[in-house]
Image (tube, helix red, strand yellow):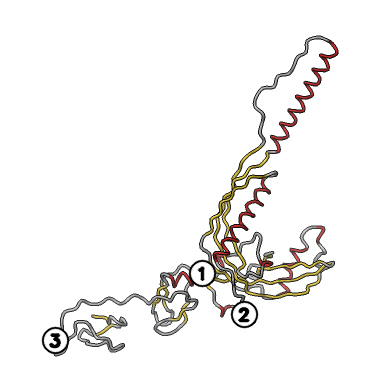
Amino acid sequence: MIYCIQCGNQLPDDAKFCFKCGAAVPGAVSGGGRTAAAPSAPPPPPLAPAGAQELKCPACGAPIHPTLGEAVVTCDYCGSSVTLGGAGWKEISKHTMLSLKLADPAQALEVVKAAVDTGFLHRKDFQESKVTDQKLSMVPYWVLPTSASTNYQYQDAAVGIGSTVAAIGASALIGSALSQGGRGGGMMVMPMFAGPAVNPTRQDTITGMYEFPVVAVKSMNSYQPKNYQFPLTERTLFDKKQIPAGTPVLNGDLTEDAARNSARAYVTQLQSNEAHKKHRMVSHFQTQVDVSEGELLHAPIWEFVLERKGQTQRMLVDAHAGRVVA
């Protein structure tokens, strides 16, 4: 049994040329003779081109739908394979999307209402507001896995108060002793205070792991989340055919390197916020942020503009998870 070295087609043992592609068979000679030749193994699957976003089967032309983590994809129609190794897979896996689940604007407004009316003093804010604009878009975000570690100092309130009380008590005793000595002329007993002064300054470290989203459109700062992470376990490879007709798909103009710098700044601020929640009077922050390779994610976002008592408020809703983004 032999195979064509050009296309991999299986050939009869006495074949001189491949009947599929016409390539000459190594070892075949004219005149009825034939030199010995080792059987050829089938060639490896073709490699997907670098930067490919959609794939078609090289044998039958049917669409191929790879899933995250696959290296070789087999065509469901004819059984042929294509490898996604190297740059081909790298580029494909870096563009993902979240599906649209909250397509009804009325349902999205219910999410907004619940967020606006949070708290006793705000329970009528949505009722008093007017929706002046609403739109749904597929917004691109750079999703960057980020780890951070922050060392900082803080003032221990309990230790500080204790030291102050002790100092006040010592002053009172000394003052009492001095007044007694001035009146009676007898022996004056001075209290003795031993031991070092208590320093209320303490140190602590907090760490955090984030899959931080940075909006990939420079002019859309209002779409930048402050502390929000998309449900990435539910993402799929980007497929424009899965997006409802008429939904704008925005193009990003922010490079991944620029997004990395933004992620470092945002995550540093998040670490600072966590430290302030944990302790009061914090200082001397030192944060180390490591940002890994990211991916481009298109997420469905509802934007609502509300007006209330002359004030304008913009609300963003994740139309996949049904949660307020900002």
Residue at image location 44% in from the left, 69% down from the top: 70
Residue at image location 81% in from the left, 14% down from the top: 181
Q: For residue 33, which numbered disc appears in the image?
A: 3
- Mark 1–mark 3 distance (CA, rounded to whole Å): 54 Å
Left or right: 52, with 302 as reference point = left
Residue at image location 54% in from the left, 74% down from the top: 238
Q: Nearer the viewer, residue 288 or 35?
A: 288
Mark 1, residue position = 94
N-term-proximal mark, 1 vs 3: 3
Does the residue at mark 1 contact the one at mark 2 (Cβ under 8 Å)?
A: no
Does the residue at mark 1 contact the one at mark 3 (Cβ under 8 Å)?
A: no
**Identity of the amino acid at label 2?**
Pro
Q: Nearer the viewer, residue 91 or 118?
A: 91
From the image, state whether disc 1 or disc 3 is nearer to you.
1
Circle 1 SS class: loop
- Mark 1–mark 2 distance (CA, rounded to whole Å): 22 Å
Circle 2 SS class: loop
Mark 2, residue position = 244
Name which quarter of the figure residue 264 lies in: bottom right
Circle 3 SS class: loop
How many discs mark residues in the rendered view? 3
Residue at image location 14% in from the left, 89% down from the top: 32
Q: Nearer the viewer, residue 57 or 158?
A: 158
Position of 106 relative to 208 (above/below): below
- Mark 3–mark 2 distance (CA, rounded to whole Å): 64 Å
From the image, state whether disc 1 or disc 2 is nearer to you.
1
Position of 288 relative to 7 (above/below): above
